[in-house]
Amino acid sequence: MRRRRFPTSGGLISIVNPDLVERLRRGSALNALDTEHLFGGAAAGFTDYPLLEPTRHRGLGFAASRRGWRAQRRRFLARREEAWASMQQSIAIAAVAVGGALGSILRYLVSSWFITRVGAGFPWGTFVINVSGSLAIGIVLQLALSRAGFNPYLRLFFATGILGGYTTFSTYAFEIYNLSASAPPVQSVGYALGSVVAGVAAAYAGTLLARAVTG
């Protein structure tokens, strides 16, 4: 007896073949996994696999059987949509959490490097972090806007996660206050205005760079 080979393993079999039991009972072919669209942020590749047509059963009218099959299919599709929405939320949270952790570690390393090299008199570390983060987010968001196939989870991972953890407005605000109390006013004002102007300019430069790369 030839062994049936499944296209994938684990829970993906039931996703690709929502009527798996009926397919095995009839000996019907299994749906192939849509690897191109799976987890792409939309229903394609997750909730759009076809179901088998109902068969005529002895003792039951075909119309009644078909109505029952349609009701069962609607219930199944509703449950599958709920599962997909929950999975999307879980993937999004994981992308932001992992990205945020990496961004925070990177901010700590960059800030520590500047303190070690130039001292803590002027917050060069935070200035460079916020300006470079503005440049990077300009690139990422421009790519996400200009490319229709840009994965939404990658956008969350880079923009909300990594760059959200990397840049810091709260530290910037405290350092303005700290400079105003311990340094000449020109330093605190220059830091406050310079960070905003340089950050906006860097974000704009990032969008121009992304446009030049993508054409």
Image: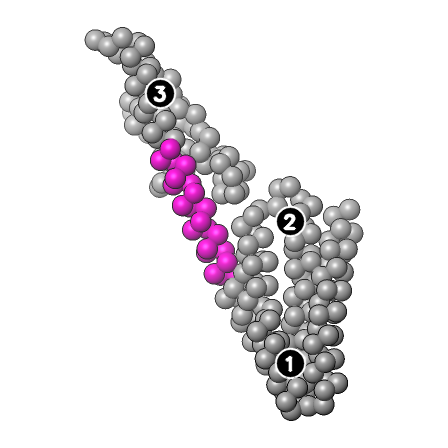
- Residue 2 picture location, percent across and down: 33, 26
Q: Dividing the picture into quarters, in which one does residue 172 lie?
A: bottom right
* N-term mark: 2 or 1: 2
27 and 153: which is toward the camera: 153
* N-term mark: 3 or 2: 3
Please, what secondary structure does the residue beneath circle 1 have?
helix
174 and 155: which is toward the camera: 174
**Relative vertical location of residue 121 with respect to residue 176 in this rendering, above or below:** below
- Residue 72 picture location, percent across and down: 32, 25
Which residue is located at x 68 percent, y 90 percent? 183
The residue wearing badge 3 is 70
Please, what secondary structure does the residue beneath circle 3 have?
helix
Circle 1: residue type: Ile
Q: Dividing the picture into quarters, in which one does residue 18 lie?
A: top left
Marks 1, 3: nearer the viewer: 1
Residues tagged 3 and 2 counted as in contact (Cβ below 8 A):
no
- Mark 1 nearby-residue class (10 Å; few <14, some 14–19, many ≥20): some
Circle 3: residue type: Arg
Asked whether residue 153 is in view, the answer is: yes
Distance CA(mark 3)–CA(mark 2): 39 Å
- Residue 126 picture location, percent across and down: 64, 76
Circle 2: residue type: Ala
Distance CA(mark 2)–CA(mark 1): 33 Å
Which residue is located at x 32 percent, y 10 percent? 63
110 vs 24, left or right, is right
Residue 144: mark in rendering: 2
**Relative vertical location of residue 124 with respect to residue 146 in this rendering, above or below:** below
